Structures are given as C-alpha cells and as structure tokens.
Image (cartoon, grey):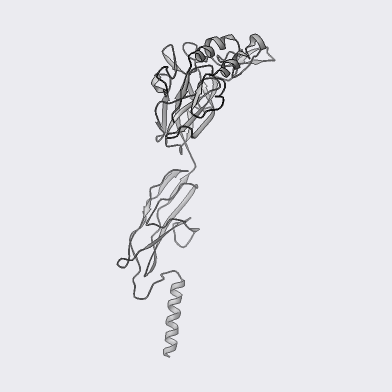
Amino acid sequence: MEKTKSFLLIALFCLLGTAGVMAQSPGVDPPQITAHPSTVGQTQFLNGVFTGISVTATGNGAETLAYQWYSSTQQSRTSGTRTLIAGATANAYTPLATTMGTLYYYCKVTGEGGTVSSSVSGAFLVNPPTTKQLTVKVYLQGLWNGTGMNKCKKYDDALGDFVDAFATDVVDTISIELRNKTTYATIDYQLHGLELHQDGTVTSAGKIYIEVPSAVADDYRITVRTRNHLETTSAIIVSFSGSAIDYNFTDAVTKAYESDPSFAPMVQKDGKWMLYAGNPLPMSPPQVNTDAFETTDLFDVVNRTSDFTGIFGYLTNDINGDGIVDTSDIFDFTLPNFNAGIYFYFPE
C-alpha cells in the first residue's frame, strides 16, 4: 500500500511540472511578481517608438531571477499565436513598431522555486505609415525675372515653337536631400522630381507641400540639388521631430551654409537670395563634400550654344530656361560665376 501511495505522489508531481503551471523545487517558493505590464494600450505608426513596459519581481533572498518576454496575437497567455522574443531577457522591454498590426506582451520570470507568468499587457497597435509636411522655398538665379521665376521651355517640333516644359506654374523639377547631421556625405533621405513653382515653393506632385514619411524624424541639413545651379545646403541642422517643417532659403543669406567668407553662399537679386546659376555638370572628378564652377561647366555651355550647334529644348545647358542654349547662358550666368571663383566646401 505504501509503495502505491509513493507512486501516485510521484506521478502527480510530474503531471504538475509538465503542465507548465509551475516547475517548483521542493521547499523553495516561486518568484512573486509585484508589478505587471501596463494594460494601457499604445498606438504608433510604422517605425515609430513605443514606450517600454516592465515587470517587478522578487525571489528568494539573493537569487538571480531570469526574465523572458513573449508576444501574443491575443490578450491571452494560452490562446492566439505566442512567440518568444529573442534577446528580450530583462525585466523591461520596449516593443518594436516594425510590423503593422496588433500584439500583446507578457513576461515569464524564473527563479529557484519555479517560473511564473505576468499578466498580459494592453494592445500595441502599429498603423500604416503616414506623412509629415515639409515646406521649402528656393529661387534659382537663372530663372529669376524680378518678381518670381520664368517657366522652363521645351521645343515642340509639331508646333514649330517653344512651349512650357511643365504644366500650371511649375518652372522645373528639383531634388531635396536630408543629409546626416554629423556626416554630411551620408544622405539619410532624399526626394526626386519635386515641383518647383514660380513663387519659389517646392512641393510633391499634386500637393501644396513636400510629403515626408513620419519615420523621418531626426535632425538633418536640407540640401537642394537642381539641373544647373550650385548645390546649396541649409546653414543649420533642422529638426524633423514635428509634423510640419519649414525652411526658406530666399529671405536671408544666412539661411545657406557658408564655407568661405570671401563670397556669399547665395546670390542676391531684387532683395531675394537665390542659388548660383550655371553649374550643369558635377565635379570632375566627383567630390562628396565640394561643388564649384569649373572649366568643364563653362565649356559645356559654350560648346552647345545654339549660335554654333543649333541646340534647342529642355536641356541642362539652358541656364535661363528659355529653351535655347545661347550666349546669354554663358555671359549672364556661367562665365560671371566661374570668374568669381564660386566654390563651396560643405560640412564634413
């Protein structure tokens, strides 16, 4: 009879252990969780940053407790898809917003006396990415007409005449680069094909602002690149932490980064500041942190003037955008800026 009782007791302990209720050493109390993860839900957009959650637990004396966090597709430890989170082995954990959807979290705490599980957190919802609004204003010297900018032209063979290269009030397309705040050579985010309007505003197609993903939320230098004007970057590092960012290059020369005090980083016309015209070619050989007016820029325009080769259309060599590469592109813009030795070192 005594042997039968012993066998039953052993079988009962084995059953309890394998059921996952608590694997407990005889005579040793399991850990006690005194603070559980918050049940208040959180919502972020994709690649946003959640506030962390944590548990507080006590063990037996000086024993070291082990922690392991899990995610679940339901607010339950026994239903839904439950996943062990690799590396989440501290008493605190910050859920990642890298996958859209809803997840819940809980923690298992293990000590000498066994393993206990926390309650399940509130819902962590990751929504699809959204955008923030960037407003940039910039003028181009080659297109300036005294009050705004002329629209670039192209040649229509069927009509035998010049027509606007772009619809509505768009004068040209440009690129905006958000450069790393500590390493200028690193482009953290870039947008191409942005519409430059006659009043100097830059927008995404069909918008009244530039659309930037919400995940672009660090501090950056704003760099403007065009087809034939000098690359120019912001004088300051601009915060993108908010939902709306504004930068106007046109109202002060101090808005552009200055590398050489011997000449202004932008040219002034009619009380407005604008990018230097006549720079249709990249540096040769290419340079990461410099841009300048070189002989290659000058000869590129000279060799393609319509006076000699009959070049018409929407071309990078057409500095003033009138659809004709001619002497005005040379003597009004490219040659004066070349002779002035306009040359920039950008931030390191």
- In the figure, is residue 231 to the left or right of 159? left
* Residue 149 in view here: no
* Depth check, front residue: 84 or 43: 84
Image x and y of residue 297, in percent? 57, 18
- In the figure, is residue 35 to the left or right of 105? left
Q: Residue furthest bottom?
A: 1
The residue at the point 45 percent across, 37 percent down is 216
Q: Is residue 183 above or below residue 269?
A: below
Q: Quadrant of the C terminus?
A: top left
- In the figure, is residue 306 to the left or right of 31? right
* Residue 301 in view here: yes
Q: Residue furthest right?
A: 158
Q: Is residue 103 above or below residue 62?
A: above
* Depth check, front residue: 97 or 62: 62
Image x and y of residue 54, in percent? 36, 55
Q: How many marks?
A: 0
Image x and y of residue 200, in percent? 47, 20
Q: Quadrant of the N terminus?
A: bottom left
Image x and y of residue 88, in percent? 43, 56
Q: Is residue 96 above or below residue 155?
A: below
Residue 303 placement: quadrant: top right
- In the figure, is residue 37 to the left or right of 160? left
The residue at the point 45 percent across, 76 percent down is 14
